[in-house]
Structure formats: structure tokens, C-alpha cells
């Protein structure tokens, strides 16, 4: 096992509930001897606990979990322990989306009307970026799968600002954005901001 392998395993680590799993035990033992990985794990666990606390405060729509698991293709071999872990990750992703929607709906002040702008930056898988701070070439394959499957997409501008990317009302652009996952592009679109949350309605994508 190397640092990369251990990190990939620990991305799914949920705390003491996973301590009995041999793969997690091996990855945790490896992290104890790698100060940088150990620090990353502490931050990852803290982030996971924060998200779990926020998600526990909302109730996903009835039947959402079963609908996602039934309809979402699983691009992995049928290792049932991994499938259960994937289902849990999908549920968290869907809950993050619901949380963002409810948060936006619950706030009714400080709205900035649409403005047409150009943004240059990296196309993000918002779920993994928010939950685990994952981005860049090493995360490209996962980001591509998640965005293509309908997970929220975003773009991180060169000044560090992150925008949630959407199409026109009723039109998804995830299939197109998935092609640029983890790549730097320039996007022309209409920006709207509510209480600090910026959305960019995509009109044109220009690859650098």
C-alpha cells in the first residue's frame, strides 16, 4: 500500500463504524506512519462530521434513496461491500443537493440580478469538492462520472471564487460539462447571487 492507495480508501472512512473492516484498518495503520496523510485524515474526518451534522437536520424526499440506487448505473465490479459504500456516497451527494436547495429557498434577501460574465477556471464535481476538497487531474475520472450522472457541477475561478453551474431552466448541461471535468475552461454565462451563493447559467464553454 502507498499513500495514494491509502487516501483512496480513507475517502470513504466514516469513523469507528468502519474500524472493523480490514481495508480501513490497513489504511489507518499506514496513515499513522505518514504525518501528511494523518493530518489530511483528521481534516477529512472533521469535514465529514460537519456535513453529517448538517445533513441530519434535513429530511430527504420520501423514496429518494431507493430511486437513486435503482436508477444510477454502477461503473464498478459487483463487490457488494463497495456497492453499499457507493450507495451511501450517492445518498450523501443527493442530500447535499437538497441542503443547497433548501438553504437557497429559505433565504429571501440580498439577491443580485443576472449579469453576463466570463469565468476562467477548473470544472468541479461540487459534491466531492465540498465534502472532501477534491479537484485537479487526480480526481478527473471520478468527477467526470459524478457530473455525467447528474451530480452538481461548478467552476472554481482563478480568484478562488466558486460558481454553481446550471443550464437554462429545465435544461441540464451535465453531459456537456462532464467532458471538461477537472479541466480549465472559460465559461460565458449569466451570474446570479443570493446571500453569497453564486450561480452561473452557462451560455458558452470555451476550452483553453
Image (spheres, rainbow, N blue to C red):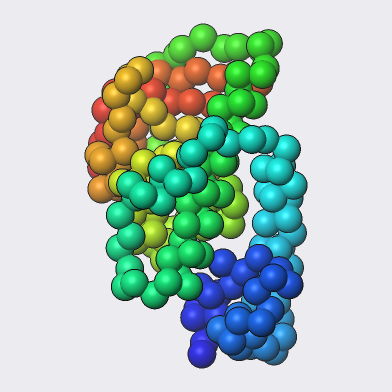
| x and y percentages locating residue 174 in the rendered image | 31, 38
Q: Nearer the viewer, residue 71 or 184?
A: 71
Q: Nearer the viewer, residue 69 or 187?
A: 69
Name which residue lies at 42% across and 61% down.
139
- In this view, 110 is above or below 139: above
- In this view, 112 is above or below 205: above
Name which residue lies at 41% across and 43% down.
67
39 displayed left or right of 198: right
Examine the image and state in which quarter residue 155 appears: top left
| x and y percentages locating residue 135 in the rendered image | 47, 56
| Total residue callouts | 0
| x and y percentages locating residue 69 in the rendered image | 41, 51
Examine the image and state in which quarter residue 22 appears: bottom right
- In this view, 186 is above or below 33: above
| x and y percentages locating residue 19 in the rendered image | 68, 79
Name which residue lies at 48% across and 51% down.
90
- In this view, 178 is above or below 28: above
Q: Nearer the viewer, residue 109 or 25?
A: 25
Q: Is residue 188 visible?
A: no
Name which residue lies at 41% across and 45% down.
68
Q: Is residue 15 visible?
A: yes
Quadrant the C terminus occupies = top left
Amino acid at each position: 500500500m502507498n499513500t495514494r492507495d491509502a487516501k483512496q480508501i480513507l475517502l470513504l472512512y466514516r469513523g469507528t463504524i468502519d474500524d472493523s473492516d480490514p481495508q480501513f484498518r490497513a489504511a489507518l495503520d499506514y496513515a499513522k506512519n505518514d504525518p501528511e496523510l494523518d493530518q489530511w485524515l483528521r481534516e477529512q474526518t472533521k469535514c465529514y462530521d460537519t456535513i453529517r451534522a448538517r445533513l441530519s437536520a434535513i429530511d430527504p424526499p420520501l423514496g429518494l434513496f431507493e430511486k437513486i440506487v435503482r436508477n444510477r448505473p454502477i461503473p464498478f465490479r459487483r463487490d457488494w461491500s463497495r456497492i453499499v459504500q457507493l450507495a451511501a456516497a450517492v445518498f450523501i451527494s443527493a442530500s447535499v443537493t437538497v441542503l443547497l436547495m433548501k438553504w437557497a429557498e429559505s433565504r429571501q434577501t440580498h439577491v443580485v440580478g443576472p449579469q453576463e460574465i466570463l469565468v476562467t477556471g477548473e470544472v468541479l464535481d461540487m459534491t466531492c469538492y465540498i465534502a472532501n476538497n477534491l479537484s485537479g487531474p487526480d480526481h478527473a475520472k471520478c468527477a467526470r462520472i459524478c457530473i455525467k450522472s447528474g451530480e452538481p457541477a461548478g467552476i472554481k475561478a482563478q480568484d478562488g471564487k466558486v460558481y454553481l453551474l446550471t443550464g437554462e431552466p429545465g435544461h441540464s448541461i451535465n453531459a456537456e460539462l462532464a467532458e471538461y471535468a477537472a479541466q480549465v475552461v472559460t465559461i460565458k454565462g449569466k451570474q446570479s447571487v443570493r446571500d453569497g451563493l453564486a450561480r452561473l447559467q452557462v451560455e458558452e464553454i470555451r476550452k483553453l
